[in-house]
Image (cartoon, rainbow, N blue to C red):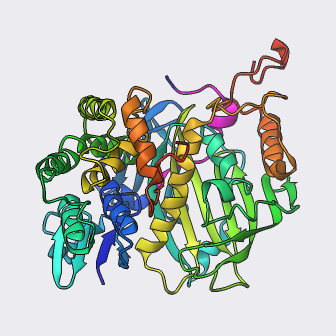
Amino acid sequence: MSLTDDRAALDQWYTLGALRDFPVGAETPSRLLGEDLTVRRLSDGVEVRAAGRTLPVRTDYGHLWTSFGTPEHALFALPESQEPDRRWIHCGPVRVRASGLRLVENFLDLAHFPYVHTDILGSEAHPEVAKYEVEQRRDVDELWATKCEFYQPKAAAASDEGQISKYMYRVVSPFNVMLYKTPPTAPDRWDVIALFVQPLDEAVSVAHAFMLVIDETSTDAELSAFQQMIFVQDKIVLENQRPSLLPLQPGRETPTRADLSSVLYRRWLKEKQLRFGTEPRTDLQSTDLPNA
Amino acid sequence: MPKLYDYVLSGSCYKVRLLLGMLGIAHETQAVDFFPGREHKRPEFLALNPLGQLPVLEDDGLVLRDAQAILCHLANKHDTSGNWLPRDDRFGPVMLWLSFAGGELMAISGARMIAMLNYPGDLVALQAKARTALRLLDDHLADRAQAGGLWLVGPTPTIADIATFPYVALSHDAGIGHEDYPAINLWQRQVRKLPGFVGMPGVPDYF
């Protein structure tokens, strides 16, 4: 496979990983949207090259970001990164044989907590997803789901009892998503847990989980292990989902009320005419085909 | 109280967690940031295990490395039934399968690190070695089933089953499915039914 011609996918910022994973002086191979890349970390900056050309680079939030195209928006804002008492936890890149869009959609889903993260993020005795609100914020081109609540037996590494966790979800670009969640030890603030997806190919992705959390007791190893445990519980489900590419065609998958955020996410992807990581549609006239 | 130096995604640590669960041994754990932090290669951890590998168990001043050795130690010290580490004719075959679990079967671990965490290595070669090991295990379990046996050795589960189960169950992460190994699948179902069984991320729940 070679670089996609999907304009909507090309014109986005993608992370290639935590900056600290690219040692100064070293050349590291990487891959994005079907194309091989080379990352060179120099003492005064980073260079990302693909097929003989140099790509734009950003180094915000401890991560390396690049794009093949011209992103319409600046990289998303993350004001919590300025707060001095936040712990920065890089959970490490994990490769998943699934569409990156499937990863984002799974990240947005509350309903699977009792069944996939049993007795941790949910319990089978409390499966109900309470009504929540979704909105598309057109000024910043982000999706938000707010007023989400869920009973969680072990909401975070520092939990020693169950709690009703409050959640907000925020999709900042098709492959970058984060959630805000009540920390067990600071109920008036929000932990930030981000999932930055690096789509290698349409059905192979690398997940970079990153947390900005309030937690004075857990070790880095405990915080990272908790998030890795959750993510690898999702991985086996993601790799067995069929079709592995996200279907956008009406009727291919049937959402329920709890899937409101997924419905909005898919509608937003269609509006952007994004194709990379989606199942080819057969219901469109050729003149309607995105980028035809 | 025994203390396990643990990493949640390690199949070798999972061997120890399984036996601790099945024998109901009270213990504490200390999380080691194996990935991405490589804490197991730092001086503090190398003082515990100069090989820089997980798991490590501390028990009454004894510091033990190697999952198979730790299983032997725990069964020797805590199992009152004498069945998990039998001292009769089953002893030799139990050792044989422990050695297999820490040897040939670890090809699955190597393939899993490459497929999942992008470690360097030859994925295709390791997958081929892993399939050879699984074939041998499946044939043995098929013979056992023919003779009415459910377990690797003898009429009860032993630490041979506990040492072998984790990387077999985690083979999906290495890009190897279970569809070619019917006897292994029957055996996996038996292991899952044992009292005190615990799962881990990546071990399928659909048996």
Question: Quadrant of residue B13 in the image?
Answer: bottom left
Instruction: Tell me: residue A266, above or below residue B182.
Output: below
Single out the residue that lies furthest toward the top.
A286
Question: Quadrant of residue A256 in the image?
Answer: top right
- Kindly identify the residue that appears in the image at 19 percent across and 64 percent down: B72
Q: Position of residue B51 (x, y in %)?
A: 14, 63
Q: Magenta residues?
A: A3-17
Question: Quadrant of residue B135 in the image?
Answer: top left
- Kindly identify the residue that appears in the image at 24 percent across and 46 percent down: B153
Instruction: Tell me: residue B125, above or below residue A28.
Output: above
Report the quarter where the C terminus of chain A lies. top right
Q: Determine if the magenta segment contains residue B110.
A: no
Q: Position of residue A2 (x, y in %)?
A: 50, 24
- Note whether residue A30 is visible: no
Q: Determine if the magenta segment contains residue A6.
A: yes
Which one is in front, A11 or B181? B181
Instruction: Tell me: residue B166, above or below residue A89.
Output: above
Q: Position of residue B148 (x, y in %)?
A: 33, 36
- Note whether residue B164 is visible: yes
- Kindly identify the residue that appears in the image at 43 percent across and 32 percent down: B177
Q: Position of residue B158 (x, y in %)?
A: 27, 55
Q: Is residue A274 left or right of residue A212?
A: right
Which one is in front, A36 or B102? B102
Which one is in front, B135 or B38? B135
**Count of marks placed on residues:** 0
